């Protein structure tokens, strides 16, 4: 049976440690240009490459806004 392998594109976790400090653990999407190159090398006719590239760009921008907003809240 073939295993389903996943490639994590985005993970943003906000935690609090026992000292009361907020911890941001961010693993953002890969660079959209790198994603496009990999998918084109794998299958240049793959119909969803542009959607995945656009999603990576969106997630990268969204995470920057999230991080800025969270840092603004916790630094008050």
Image: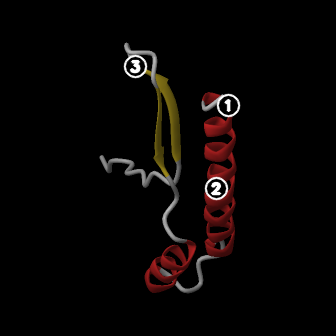
- Which marked residue is nearer to the observer: mark 2 or mark 3? 3
**Mark 3 / mark 1, whichever is N-terminal:** 3
Q: Which residue lies furthest to the left in this view?
A: 1
Q: Position of residue 2 (x, y in %)?
A: 32, 50
- Relative height, residue 20 to residue 6 (above, below): above
The quadrant of the rendering that contains the C terminus is: top right
63 up-or-down from 53: above or below: above
Residue pointed to by mark 2: 59
Q: Quadrant of residue 20?
A: top left
Instruction: Point out which mark residue 44 bears.
Output: none
The residue furthest front is: 76
The answer for how far apart the CA atoms under marks 2 and 3 are is 26 Å
**Residue at left 40%, top 19%?**
17
According to the picture, the residue beneath numbered tag 1 turns out to be 73
x then y, percent, for residue 31: 51, 70
**Helix, strand or loop status at disc 2:** helix
Residue 35: image location, x then y, percent? 51, 73
């Amino acid at each position: 049976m073939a295993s389903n392998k996943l490639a994590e594109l985005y993970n943003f976790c906000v935690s609090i440690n026992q000292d009361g400090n907020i911890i941001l653990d961010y693993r953002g999407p890969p660079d959209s240009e790198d994603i496009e190159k990999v998918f084109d090398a794998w299958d240049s006719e793959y119909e969803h490459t542009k959607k995945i590239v656009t999603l990576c760009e969106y997630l990268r921008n969204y995470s920057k806004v999230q991080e800025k907003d969270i840092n603004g809240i916790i630094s008050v």
